[in-house]
Image (cartoon, rainbow, N blue to C red):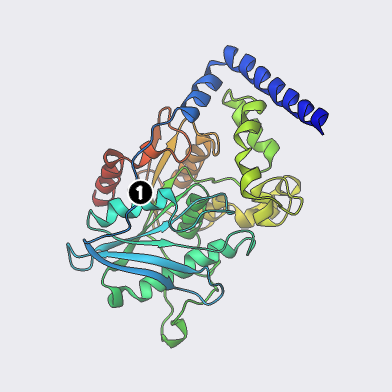
């Protein structure tokens, strides 16, 4: 046992030495790794108290799962404030509606005149694709149907998502009401008319637009100057989050329920945002989108955001997508949620 431990330590030590040598001659890798290790941190108050309006906690929007609920915050500052739906990230396998990033968002926006709904959805351990997407669209319809009851404007609804939540937000924004929209919301059977899940604006924070194999992901990072060893080390957080992925290699495989690397392009279409962008968006039917991404992101390459921007522009014409690339910011960095940056998001929404 002691000998095995020494072997493991020796291997880990060797990896560290190799990584150090690589980064000594690879300035881009050094920059990215440095800003992942020494990122800044915003203070997040532990207090849950809010006196600026009315809080509705754990509103169940679907009967399919006890995890299908949301928290809603409606400020008193104005009558029928605009609504932002907030979708947390977590690689489809962890986190909930009270994630650090979701708290940054709803705390800031509810204090700046927006009704905020932060939502839970079924994770991969409970439901494979398209469970989480169906939940998000179900929650949007629930919120639109209950706008008069809770007192906000859902006619021009915005949706925010980060990382995996960014994927879900974009998919909710680019799919039609006859796609991934069959999950009934609570109270739907009492209505005479169907309720749309359409959103007007997407706030896409470093969303993973391309569910792909590990080899494909590493190849893209390699094209950006980031070697395999850095990617491999950056992925180790998964080992502590998902103990057993039923033999799948990545969380994307685990959520989809298939090995993505072996799938044909036609098979991939069903979960590809690009397919629905090309199919559904037109100059006459545009969707506005703001993209926020850091160029030191080791979880989702910023080039994915560039490609989804270009796909939106090709489908509906330019002028509907605003992409902001933040230098030296890592994945889910607190600095992306500073008052200054979120103030610019408010300006975007009001522009």
User: Which sits in the foreground, 206 or 170?
Assistant: 206
Q: Would residue 230 appear left or right of 244 to someone viewing this image?
A: left
Q: Mark 1 packing: few (<14 Cα in 10 Å), some, or many (20+)?
A: many
Q: Which residue is mark 1?
A: 104
Residue 263 on image: x %, y %: 73, 50
Q: Would residue 158 appear left or right of 223 to someone viewing this image?
A: left
User: Which sits in the foreground, 314 or 252?
Assistant: 252
The correct choice, above or below, for 203 with respect to 36 in the image is below
Residue 81 on image: x %, y %: 24, 64
Residue 162 appears in view: yes
Residue 215 on image: x %, y %: 70, 36
What residue is rendered at 57% in x and 49% in y?
91
Place residue 8 in its image quadrant: top right
Residue 176 appears in view: no
The secondary element bearing badge 1 is classed as: helix
What residue is rendered at 77% in x and 50% in y?
247
The correct choice, above or below, for 82 with respect to 190 in the image is above
């Amino acid at each position: 046992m002691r000998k095995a431990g020494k072997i493991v330590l020796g291997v880990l030590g060797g990896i560290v030495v190799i990584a150090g040598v690589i980064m000594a001659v690879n300035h881009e890798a050094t920059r990215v790794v440095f800003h992942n290790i020494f990122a800044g941190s915003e203070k997040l108050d532990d207090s849950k108290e809010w006196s600026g309006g009315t809080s509705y906690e754990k509103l169940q929007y679907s009967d399919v799962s006890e995890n299908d609920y949301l928290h809603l915050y409606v400020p008193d500052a104005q009558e029928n404030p605009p609504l932002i739906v907030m979708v947390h990230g977590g690689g489809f396998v962890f986190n909930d509606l009270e994630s650090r990033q979701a708290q940054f968002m709803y705390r800031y926006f509810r204090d700046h005149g927006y009704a905020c709904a932060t939502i839970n959805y079924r994770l991969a351990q409970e439901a494979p694709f398209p469970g989480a997407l169906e939940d998000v669209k179900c929650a949007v319809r629930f919120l639109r149907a209950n706008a008069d009851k809770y007192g906000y404007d859902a006619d021009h609804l915005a949706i925010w998502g980060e990382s995996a939540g960014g994927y879900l937000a974009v998919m909710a924004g680019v799919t039609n009401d006859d796609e991934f929209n069959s999950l009934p919301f609570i109270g739907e059977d009492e209505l005479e008319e169907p309720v749309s899940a359409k959103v007007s604006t997407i706030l896409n924070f470093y969303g993973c637009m391309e569910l792909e194999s590990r080899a494909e992901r590493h190849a893209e990072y390699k094209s950006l100057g980031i070697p395999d060893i850095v990617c491999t080390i950056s992925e180790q957080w998964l080992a502590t989050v998902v103990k057993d992925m039923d033999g799948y290699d990545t969380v994307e495989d685990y959520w989809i329920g298939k090995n993505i690397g072996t799938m044909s392009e036609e098979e991939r279409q069903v979960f590809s945002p690009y397919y629905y962008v090309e199919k559904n968006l037109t100059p006459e039917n545009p969707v506005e989108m703001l993209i926020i991404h850091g160029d030191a992101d080791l979880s989702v390459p910023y080039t994915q955001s560039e490609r989804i921007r270009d796909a939106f522009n090709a489908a509906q014409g330019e002028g509907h997508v605003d992409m902001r690339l933040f230098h030296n910011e890592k994945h889910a960095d607190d600095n992306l949620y500073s008052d200054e940056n979120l103030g610019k998001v408010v300006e975007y929404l009001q522009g």
